[in-house]
Image: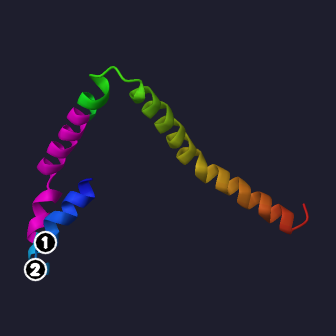
Amino acid sequence: MALRRFYNEIKGLKVKEVPNHVKPMLSLDYLKKSVGRALDNYNEKYIQTGSIDPLYHVCFGGMIFSYLVALPEERRHLEHQQHAKEHGH
């Protein structure tokens, strides 16, 4: 949704006008306000309604995070296994 809105905003601009339109969006203050709005929207949509979805978000987020943390070790293990197979060990 946000990308669609952003695209619609810059669609009518000339190429020279795009940097001046995007530059304020890259400030720290704009980022803080955007994160604040996102947290407020999340709170209103899930927390205030008593939904179980935040629990799912934490569980799946934790699973994805642990997978990403373990991924380099797994890749090293698979490379070592492949190397051992190629050299007959």
Image quarter for residue 15? bottom left
- Residue furthest top in the image: 50
Residue type at tag 2: Lys
Q: Say which amino acid is labelled 1.
A: Pro
Evaluate if marks 1 and 2 touch, with contact meaning CB atoms under 8 Å apart: yes
Where residue 86 sits in the image (x, y, percent)? 84, 68
* Residue 43, position as x, y percentages in the image: 26, 29
Q: Within 10 angstroms of label 1, few (less than 14), some, or many (20 or more) residues?
A: few
Residue on which the image places disc 2: 16
| Residue annotated with mark 1 | 19
- Residue at 46% x, 38% y: name it: 61
Residue at 12% across / 48% down in the picture? 29
**Residue ranking furthest to the right:** 88
Q: At 10% across and 79% down in the image, what residue appears? A: 16
- Above or below, comparing residue 1 to residue 21 in the picture: above
Q: CA distance from mark 1 to mark 2?
A: 7 Å
Quadrant for the C terminus in the image: bottom right
